[in-house]
Amino acid sequence: MQNLLDPAILFFVFGIAAGLLRSNLEIPQSIAKFLSLYLLMALGLKGGFALASSGLSSSVLTSLFAALLMSVIVPALGYTFLKSRMSKFDAAAVAASYGSVSAVTFVTAIQYLESQNLFVGGHMAVAMVLMESPAIIMAVFLANLLRQNVSASVQVSGLGTGGAVLSGMDEPGRFPSIGKILHESFTNGAHLLLLASLLIGFASGETGKAMMSPFSSDLFKGMLAFFLLDMGLMVAKNLPGLEGKSPSLLIYGALGPLVHASIALGLAWLLNLPVADAVLLMVLSASASYIVVPAVLRYAIPEANPSVYFGLSLGVTFPLNILIGIPLYTFLAKAVMMP
């Protein structure tokens, strides 16, 4: 209940309501992009400052290892479950989306943990960065294996392009290489800004923290509320796209994150992670990317339907995590890790 009374969360709920009521309320795209970049920069700086203070201890490295492990487990489970229930290309794309992470969900979780007086280490921002790409690599690898079993003519006709070159191909008959996909993933503007901010915060330490505090701390909550308002509007806009989708897909979007979070909690318990690290590992494992991964999959797996992997992550999983998931994961982590 406390999470639902948070002003940022209430603005998110208001955004959904305004969108469903077909209000003309909207956040200009340029402002929405600025808010996204601000949150990533502030998050990176805060993480870098905290990491400079704590250093790379064995506990930090253990948490990073757990994050990398979950970034492989989640897409593998997702693809295994979905491949017999939908197009295998769509299954690979959805698995990539859920194997990667949502920065906004992560930011919201940090705010919630701070309200619960739980210390958040800066290394978990590093964990978020590490979890971005493994799922994308797995999805592209799976897509390339699938293409080997399908002739070029079937690939083209199946997409209804009438013999045209598939969007995303480097040239007729050739899809982008893994190297190109990795370059696109790691040089994505949002991803790169987060990495740079993290390094700058780490390098500048306490001095930088004092200088940037009004920017990275004082404004953060208000900017997050504004951005979540825009996300609420986007969720409402994408909900109609889920009509007619397979029940299995919708069940995966709603219950899959709970399964992923449960596995993350079990791993955190085995590795004896701090409670805040356990919560954030659960949040990262339960979230789904709707920014970086769709941008890469758009040309990496053009056979996949964007309305499936984008609509499911943004229309189902994101609001469930924001409204219910974060406080639930925190409660479970406290119960298991602090008996």
Image (cartoon, rainbow, N blue to C red):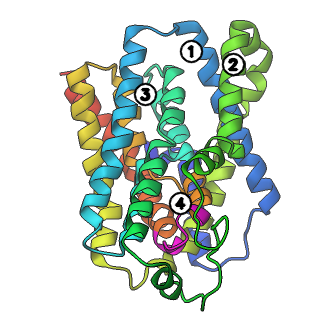
Q: Nearer the viewer, residue 40 or 13?
A: 40
* Outermost residue toward the left in this view: 339
In the image: residue 29, left or right of residue 307: right
Q: Within 10 angstroms of label 1, few (less than 14), some, or many (20 or more) residues?
A: many
Residue 186 lies left or right of residue 29; in this view the side is left
Residue highlighted by disc 3? 116
Asked whether the residues under the numbered discs 4 and 3 touch, taking CB atoms below 8 Å apart as contact, a structural biologist would say no
Q: Residue at x 34, y 70 (%)?
A: 250
Whether residue 222 is visible here, answered yes or no, is no
Are circles 1 and 2 on residues that touch, CB within 8 Å?
A: yes
Which label belongs to residue 51? 1
What residue appears at the point 38 percent right and 23 percent down from the top-left corner?
Answer: 63
Residue 300 among magenta residues: yes
Query: Circle 2 is placed at which residue position?
Result: 201
Question: Looking at numbered disc 4 in the image, what kind of residue is underneath it?
Answer: Val
Residue that numbered label 4 is attached to: 13
Q: Is residue 89 magenta?
A: no
In the image, the segment drawn in magenta is: 298-308
Depth check, mark 4 against mark 2: the one in front is: 2
